[in-house]
Structures are given as C-alpha cells and as structure tokens.
Amino acid sequence: MSRHHIDRRTFLKTCGKVALAAPLLTETLLLSGCARCVPHKRNNEIPQKIVLQNGSVFMGGRYRRLDMEIQEGKIIHLADRILALPDHNTNVMDCSGLHISPGWVDLHCHIGTTIGIEPCLLGPQMGVTALVEAGTYGPETLPSFFENCCPGESIPVYLFLNVRKNGIQVSNVLFKSRPGVEDVEGARRLAMEYPDIIKGFKVRLDTTNTPSGHPTFLAETTAKLAADLSMPVMYHLGNPEPSITDFLKVSKPGDIITHFLRETNNCVVLPSGAIRPEAREAKANGVLFDVGHGLASFRFETARKALEQDFSDFTISSDLWILPSLSKSLTFANVASKFLALGLSLEDVTRKISSRPREILQIESEIQVGKKIDLTLFSIQEGEFAYSDTGGEELKYNSRIMPRYTVVNGEMIHAGGRDQQLFTCRNPEGTFA
C-alpha cells in the first residue's frame, strides 16, 4: 500500500476519534467548572480596586516579593508593603505562595468549528488572557469566527488568517493544495478591514496536501501577500514536503515557524542532532520560533538538542484543539510545565508564555505602575509528575505550574479548574498536595 493511502487512512481514523471524543471533552470541561460559555462582565458587586499582597511579581525578567494595587485594570501602586483592608470598594487578597506574571498568551490554538474549542474554555479559566486562532479560518469562513467566537469575550482573541478560501477543513488536510484554493484578494481585504484582530497569516502544509511539482505554492502566495501588507506569517511544520528549509527561503523577520521541536525529519534539529544552519541563520535574522505542542508536534529529545545548542529564544504555545485537549497537550499550563522538566528556569518559562508573546502581538508586556495589563496568578505544585511528549517518551519531574487566578480588565477570575482536576492528587491525610 502506498504511503499516501496510509496517510489518508490514519487521517480518517483521527477524524473518527474527533467525533467520538467530542462528548467526552464536553463532559470533562463541564466538570472542570465551565458549564456555560458566558463572558465575564463587571457588575455592581465587583469591587473597583484589587490589592494583591505577599505575591511574587515578575518584573524586569525576575520574580520579587511585592504588593500590588489595581484599579480598573491599571496598576496604580507597587510597593514592598501596601496596607489595605477589605471593604465594599476593595478586594484584598493574600497571594502568599503565588507568582504573578503578565497575563499568559496562547499564541497557537484552534477555536470553534468542528475541531476547535470555545474560547471561554481556553481563556481566563485556563490562566490565559489572550488567544491566537492559528489558521482555522479563511476568507470564506471568517464570518463564522466573528459570529461564534468573538461576541462578548472578556479577553482579546486574535487571528492568523488562512489564505485558503475555507481555512483548515478535512478536505484541506487530505487533498492537494493546488492553485485555486486560495483567495488572496479576500484575505487582503479582511486583513485591512480588521487590523486589530487579524495579526498575520497562517500556512498549513505537509505531505498530505502539497501538490507534486510545486509543494510551496501556497506558502509563496501567502508570503507575497504578507510582505505587501507588512504582516507576519506563521508556517506549520509537518511531515515533509514542504520542508523547514522551503519555508525559511520565503520567510522574513517577524515570521513564525511553529512546531519547530517536532521529530527530526522536519524541524530545527537535523537527524544528526545538530541545529540546521538555515534555522540558526533565520533566527539571527529575526525569524521567530514557536512550540505549537498539539497532538503530534513536540519531542523531548528535539527540545533537549535545541536547548543544549542554545537555540532557546522561542515562545511556548499549546496548539489545543479537541484531541490535544484529551491527550498530549491537555492544558496550556501542562505544556509550559514540560519546559520546567527540561531544565528551564521559571523566569525563562514565564517570559516564553507571557511577556514575549505579548511583545509579538504588540500588547502591554511589562508589569509597571501606570500600565493597564491583564495578569495570571499561579502556584508551583510539588509532587511526582510524569510528563509525556507526542512521541510517547515520558519525563518525570517534581513540580508543575498550576494556574489559580487571572485578573482581566480589573476583574479577578478563578483559574485552573481543569488543571486541578487532572493533576492534583491527595496525600494520605486527604488534603491536596
């Protein structure tokens, strides 16, 4: 049987799993405390001022113990000690044992449609304060994104638009992307019409859908449009072809290579274990690299080789859609915790999930007096945890990141329900470890 038929069979089995998994995912997420996708709205019972005491605040690339006063989402006071008492206008919270960072950003996820997840499940309740929808929608299907994914959302939901007419669908993944699948002028018009939402373009190509003889057709088409509009492109790495070198040839500073730590048949690490010279050169020239964990795009061994050779400036994203929500990625914090297990410092992981992606999106990235910024409050849970990559390798480590709250537009929101359900175990005394 040909490789093409094997790939088709595998893909169709995956589609079947999506259909079977949807009810289970719904049940699991309902249990985690998000029974309805409703926006978080301020009401008269929510205090206008929040004082966070005894927390460890991420400033200038490191954590330091500070108290913080927030009014209407703006930081109005930072000090070693802020004396405040709770009243009807002030919510005072003891943050002992909590870390406070700029709000987490998931730079690569999939929202809505038959394979994506509702933004309320990916956002503040998962510790995330900004989302980037990575290419599920094209010019023809973008109206459904606005109808189903944006109204009333409490956090910004950005989009990397697919130049394919109908975005990512079964037919796009399974059949060849020959000339005619694209709508360049439609994508151009929409990008100019919605500059606050559409932050760039997404190219998803691999061996299952690239046309023989011209595998980079859609990448080249998208790259030209993005260059005309001075916007970035996010390139998906899968089984070649195209290869990472094909994408790097058309990439420019500010473009993003996602899934860059996947298996070594197509990533920044050669099968020999060395960093690809083209990838290192691109990085030096300003091309960005993003994890995009997902169901099949992250290997511990690849990450080790990259980190050992100082290929360490990248963003951490989940690539969450239905199946990775049930296996492999599971949650955004779970993906971030894997990098603690790989030896990165908490400060480095924090930058990769908060301030750095915020810089890329050109939203406020630093905690400073006078700045309006969303926040994520999290703890470090101690225990024995077994992390897995998408190839089945297991890595044990003694801690994980656990989201506890987000502060969005000045409102305190409980976070981490799903993480606590999945990862918190009880000690013999019956209290949570």
Image: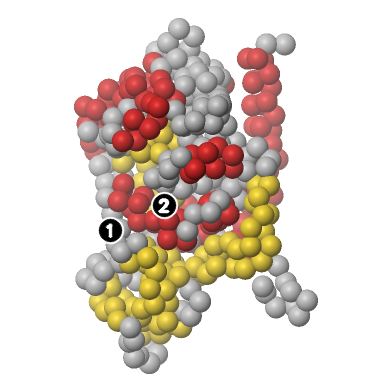
What residue does disc 2 label? 352
Q: At label 1, which amino acid type do we have?
A: Glu
The quadrant holding residue 164 is top left
Please state, as top left, top right, bottom left or bottom right, where the C terminus lies in the image.
Answer: bottom right
Q: Residue at x 56, y 20 (%)?
A: 208
Q: Pointers 2 and 1 in contact (CB under 8 A)?
A: no
Residue 166 is left or right of residue 421, and the answer is: left
Outermost residue to the right: 428
Question: Residue 121 in the image: x percent, y percent?
Answer: 52, 55
Question: Residue 368 in the image: x percent, y percent?
Answer: 26, 69
Question: Residue 288 in the image: x percent, y percent?
Answer: 36, 38
The circle on residue 364 is 1
> Could one spot residue 285 in this view of the protein?
yes
The circle on residue 236 is none
Residue 361 is left or right of residue 105, and the answer is: left
Q: Residue at x 41, y 52 (%)?
A: 352
| Figure check: 162 above or below 385 | above
Q: Report the front residue among 247 and 155.
A: 247
Q: At label 2, which amino acid type do we have?
A: Lys
Crowding at mark 2 (Cα within 10 Å: few <14, some 14-19, many 20+): many
Element type at mark 2: helix
Crowding at mark 1 (Cα within 10 Å: few <14, some 14-19, many 20+): some
Please state, as top left, top right, bottom left or bottom right, where the N terminus lies in the image.
Answer: top right
Which of pointers 2 and 1 lies earlier in the amino acid sequence? 2
Element type at mark 1: loop
| Figure check: 319 above or below 236 | below
Single out the mark in the foreground, 2 or 1. 2
> Could one spot residue 222 in this view of the protein?
no
Color theme of the render: secondary structure
